[in-house]
Image (cartoon, rainbow, N blue to C red):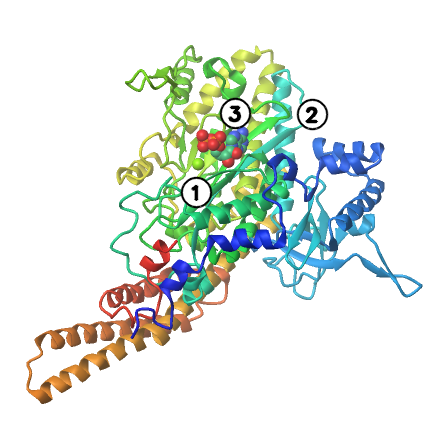
Amino acid sequence: MPKTSPRFNILAAATSWDPSRIDGERERRGVPPPMRIEEIFGENTFGLAQMRARLPKQVFRRLCATIEQGLLLDSSVADAVAIAMKEWALEKGATHFTHWFQPMTGFTAEKHDSFITPNVGGGAVAEFSGKDLIQGEPDASSFPSGGLRGTFEARGYTAWDPTSPAFIVETPAGAYLSIPSAFASWAGEALDNKTPLLRSMHALDVQTQRALKLFGAAPARVLATCGPEQEFFLIDQEFYYRRPDLVTSGRTLFGAKPPRGQELEDHYFGSIPNRVLAFMMEVERKLYRLGVPVKTRHNEVAPGQYEMAPIYENANVAADHQQLTMLELRNSARKYGLVCLLHEKPFAGVNGSGKHVNWSLGTEDANLLDPGETPHSNMQFLFFCTAVLRAVHRHQDLLRATVAHAGNDHRLGANEAPPAIISVFLGEQLTEILEQIETSGSATTSREGGLLGLGTPVLPDLPRHASDRNRTSPFAFTGNKFEFRAPGSSQSVSFPTTVLNTIVSEAIGEMCTTLESELESGSVFEEALRRLIAHEVADFKRIIFNGDGYSEDWPVEAERRGLLNLRTTFEALDTLPSEKNISLFEKSGVLSRRELVSRHEIALEVYFKTINIEGETTADIAKTMILPAAIRYLNDLLAVADRMGTLGIESRGTMRMIREVNDLVDDFSEKLAHLVEQNAELGGETPHSKSRHMQENIIPAMQEVRGVADRLEKVLPDDVWPLPTYRDMLFVK
Ligand code: ADP
Ligand code: MG
């Protein structure tokens, strides 16, 4: 049998991408070379510049008041905007428009409508009214609602979000206008990820303004800012489509660890392979045109793993742009013969992928979490920093729940991602300042960074940061923002951000209440503030952990401190609808009790369905691909033994192989039978009991089957093994 078995072709994968194809295509089509960023940036969005140029001054000003200050939109404005937006979209070649929304699947959804309306004369005109812009009504009974809506109540509304710019989606076959929208039920309950995010941004705005007033400032608006870093894997499509597990579940359910994984640490920050770089540049170009400010790109730790990150933006726009980034990553890969894997753990044994959510809050011109040079004297910074710490300490469960889904269970607490314990890395400088305030009521010094000499006169001295970095913390202060590192790579950033906004707005509000009542009873502001911070520090300080989050001692220490350690999705999700959390969300107006309970239900449903698919796929591949391959090989060996016996040749080696393979086949079919049995069980009636069945029975049964399969992979001949291996997938670039 040739080395390139008909099942998959490594050589084809390695050579299928010809760089000249891209250049040649450009020449053939007379496409000009890439343009300057500042010329193409945002050209496919109906942003402020386009609006200013196309809208009557009056309308533009009123729209700006909504976008910049969050004021209520006047419906007469919508008609004027609709006309201008339609003209612009038609000029860009769009034939259709869609409300683009984010149902609770974590993905985006759209339903296209043509601009075309027939006219009396038998022709057609392009129409698009203010009403079309503001409201859509997809028949959306098939989107998850977690009990908020029966299937007989099909009505769902999408509502234009004027604070996130509409954009043109270009495809090889044509273009359409996409309008970022919220999605709600007939009763006005949120069925999406955008609505609560916008509500939480409003809550944060209100409470932060209240606090800033105490500090003597009155900004027009406070915004949550978000900069999400995206990690992902790229593999050749040749392999992807020959792995039913990747196709159905996004991760490999089988696969022995290759002799070489990421041990040499030569991939991280290494030079980006040409094919991958060409792909990334195309993704970036498309994103620039959509106004997404992608900034950095590099190789990540595992072979075949990469990262892209944008410049931060207001959290609502950032969340939309993050969705666009995932879409473009997935869509553009095919042109390069690649498939982009956004799953948290496509490959066991090498690092998984996360999505670090950098978060802060700021006014038009100041980042409120920027400590400045002398944080000890920056009381306003210390106030907001304290609020974040108070919030994280009180709502560890909730933060953990926002990152709880099946894919992330493989990652959290493994040796590549923060543990499932929520703690905060603050760095020595800030920790020392807070300690000073706690013990003596005030802080008088800040540890300084100073200069870092590199030991040779030819290299410049570098300014050193006052604190080192810590990659092992799930929630780290990184100089002028917090970085939430637990979210998974496939996840929407909306819910983690919504929760951050909500819990911090609650903390700010409560701290304001204390300060305001102290001021009323005649206290001096500065003194009241110091007392408040000292009191808070004493309360939350057990959440601060500057040590190694990957160490074995940490879970023990965390337990001693009384911190939560919710190891699995199943455990973490159960904390979601607690009375504490319901009251938090209701008070802030972010989610009603029903909305929160429905989110819990949906998360459980997604969890058990995900594992159920994995369980079925594991059994399928085991039964129809791996077991037959093993038996075929056994048959070959037996034929050899038979002939040797006939010829009277002793066959110790062959007999040994026969016994080894036969034992593995026995073991494998036993474990497979157990998995099939478990798959047949429903696990009860509710999403909760079904999820428990997945966690307690299906996952272990799958692991058992995989364990034997991975041993078989190391024994079966290369040309008999029915799946592309880790070595193929991770190293052919
Ligand atoms: P670092 O040195 O910590 O990597 P970078 O400036 O490279 O910092 O930022 C890393 C990520 O954090 C980027 O995606 C960036 O947009 C984001 N970021 C920076 N400042 C803020 C902020 N104020 N709010 C939210 N995200 C931010
Ligand atoms: Mg980072």
Residue 492, horizontal then vertical, whole percent: 54, 48
Residue 181 in sight in this render: no
| Nearer to us in this view, 270 or 397 | 270
- Tag 3 residue: 369
Within 10 angstroms of label 2, few (less than 14), some, or many (20 or more) residues? Answer: few
SS type, badge 2: loop
Residue 326, horizontal then vertical, whole percent: 54, 49
Residue at x-position 47% and y-position 57% = 339
Assign the N terminus to one quadrant of the image: bottom left
Whether pointer 1 and pointer 2 mark residues with C-beta atoms closer than 8 Å, the reply is no
**Which label's residue is closer to the chain start, 1 or 2?**
2
Q: Is residue 626 toward the left or the right of residue 529 in the image?
A: left
| Nearer to us in this view, 251 or 388 | 251
**Which label's residue is closer to the chain start, 1 or 3?**
3
Q: Is residue 612 toward the left or the right of residue 265 in the image?
A: right
Q: Is residue 601 above or below residue 713?
A: above
Q: Is residue 312 above or below residue 91?
A: above
How many numbered marks does the figure carry? 3
- Tag 1 residue: 486
SS type, badge 1: loop
Within 10 angstroms of label 3, few (less than 14), some, or many (20 or more) residues? Answer: many
